[in-house]
Image (cartoon, rainbow, N blue to C red):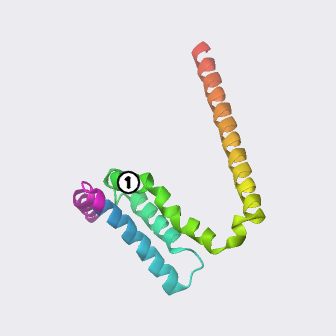
């Protein structure tokens, strides 16, 4: 068994069964990315560097996707909690509670609706094209 496979097997056994261990590993990769970002002065957020590091580990097979799935789902399920600091920042800037805030909300809602509508139209078009191709193959 190669060293790469041994490492992958270790990660799979060590963190594959525990959600807490998976979350701790994801946070550790994030903190390592943060440390690299601050130490090197790279103008890229540490979370982005950590995300790329985790993507690299998954792409090379060092970590299996199945080993991280439960922890990732746990983080995604509680994602709303990560936006609480943003809400608290709004309270520090009272101007967001007036006309400026209403304008920003209108822009956010309109932008979200545009993205949702365009996504729905793109999915619908893709689905129709897929059905048309399947019909051509069935008739050919």
Looking at the picture, tell me which residue is in the foreground, 137 or 90.
Answer: 90
Where residue 77 sits in the image (x, y, percent)?
A: 42, 51
| Left or right: residue 98 compared with residue 68 | right
The residue depicted at 39 percent of the width and 63 percent of the height is 57
Residue at figure coordinates x 45%, y 81% from the top left = 35
Secondary element at image label 1: helix
Image location of residue 20, percent across then percent down: 29, 61
Image quadrant occupied by the C terminus:
top right
Q: Main secondary structure of the magenta part?
A: helix
How far across and down, in percent of the image, does residue 31 sit?
Answer: 42, 75
Residue 42 image offset from top left, x and y in percent: 57, 81
Depth order, front residue of 112/32: 112
Identify residue for label 1: 74
Residue 8 in view here: no
Decide: is 122 above or below 98. Answer: above
The image quadrant where one finds the N terminus is bottom left
**Which image quadrant for residue 101?**
bottom right
Which residue is located at x 74 percent, y 49 percent? Answer: 110
Q: Which residues are magenta?
A: 1-20
Q: Is residue 74 visible to us here?
A: yes
Which residue sits at x=38%, y=65%? 26
Does residue 18 show up magenta in the picture? yes
Relative horizontal placement of residue 68, taking residue 48 as reference (left or right):
left
């Amino acid at each position: 068994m190669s060293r790469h496979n041994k490492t992958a097997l270790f990660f799979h056994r060590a963190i594959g069964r525990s959600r807490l261990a998976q979350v701790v590993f994801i946070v550790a990769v994030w903190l390592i990315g943060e440390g690299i970002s601050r130490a090197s002065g790279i103008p890229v957020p540490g979370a982005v560097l950590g995300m790329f590091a985790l993507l690299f580990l998954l792409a090379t097979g060092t970590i299996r996707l199945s080993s991280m799935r439960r922890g990732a789902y746990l983080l995604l399920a509680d994602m709303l909690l990560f936006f609480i600091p943003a809400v608290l920042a709004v309270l520090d800037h009272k101007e967001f509670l007036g006309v400026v805030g209403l304008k920003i909300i209108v822009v956010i809602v309109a932008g979200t609706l545009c993205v949702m509508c365009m996504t729905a139209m793109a999915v619908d078009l893709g689905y129709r094209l897929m059905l048309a191709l399947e019909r051509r193959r069935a008739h050919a």
